[in-house]
Image (tube, grey):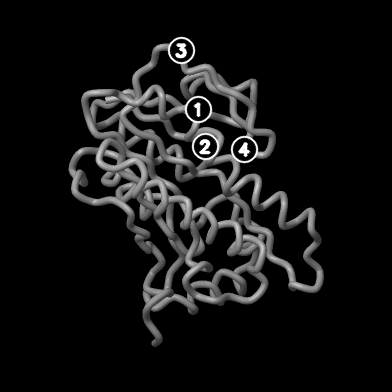
Amino acid sequence: MNYLVVGATSAVGKEIVSQLEQMGHTVLGTTRSKDQSDTGGFYYDALSQQTIDFGHTELDGLIYLPGTINLKPFSRLTEQDFMEDFKINLLGAVKIIQQALPNFRKLSVGSVVLVSTVAVSKGLPYHASVAAAKGALEGLGRSLAAELAPKVRVNVIAPSLTDTPLAAKLLATDQRRETAMDKHPLKRIGKPSDIAPLAVFLLTGTSDWITGQVIAVDGGLSTLSV
């Protein structure tokens, strides 16, 4: 099987690539750096959303990982902040899905996986811009799941704070890390290895009766109060 990992050089992306390759699948990756060519050779910047030529490559699924953590008080958020979050989190996904779908294998069911955030289902302060953008992404996922059935399944993963370079500023001190851990019922921060197995499950045929779902991987934050 051939899977496209958009954001293959991110912390979570690397873990997904590794697990898919260990299962014997072929992984095509994208990177924001034109100098990196070890992930399949596709350059894709979610903000600029350029066109990718997939040629005659047949795809069985894709996951879209690019995202933002732009946390500010609502009074300080600008229109540009909202637009940049919207472009990266939603429009970047729209563009690459539209480009990739014609290359999905015709004689099997394909899979699309999107990545949202716990901040959509659980109101969190200072998350207005990213929650708005990811909320739109969840709406896109459900709509596409209905429109593309039965040939393509579409699901969304909604993680909480995960220990990746993107979240480094939020975990920059021991006190910040401790505070973040304490907010979660399971009392720890997420790891890329917490997200990747679910992503691989949703991409591959072992989940072939699951579509239109938003699945939380958040240490219990969205549903539990302890």
Q: How far apart are marks 1 and 4 (CA)?
A: 13 Å
Dot 4 or dot 3, earlier in sequence: 4
Left or right placement of residue 161 versus residue 33 in this view: left
> What count of labels does the image hold?
4
Find out whether the residues at labels 2 and 4 contact each other: C-beta distance under 8 Å: yes
Secondary structure at numbered mark 1: helix
* Of the two numbered discs 1 and 2 in the rendering, the one whose residue sits closer to the viewer: 1
Amino acid carrying label 2: it is: Gly
Judging by the rendered image, the residue that carries numbered circle 4 is 46
Q: Where is residue 139 in the image (x, y as percent from the top left)?
A: 47, 57
Residue 99's tag is: 1
Q: Residues within 10 Å of mark 3 (few under 14, many from 20)?
A: few
Q: Residues within 10 Å of mark 1 (few under 14, many from 20)?
A: some
Judging by the rendered image, the residue that carries numbered circle 2 is 7
* Of the two numbered discs 3 and 2 in the rendering, the one whose residue sits closer to the viewer: 3
Q: Distance between the residues labelled 3 and 1?
A: 11 Å
* Of the two numbered discs 4 and 3 in the rendering, the one whose residue sits closer to the viewer: 3
* Of the two numbered discs 1 and 4 in the rendering, the one whose residue sits closer to the viewer: 1
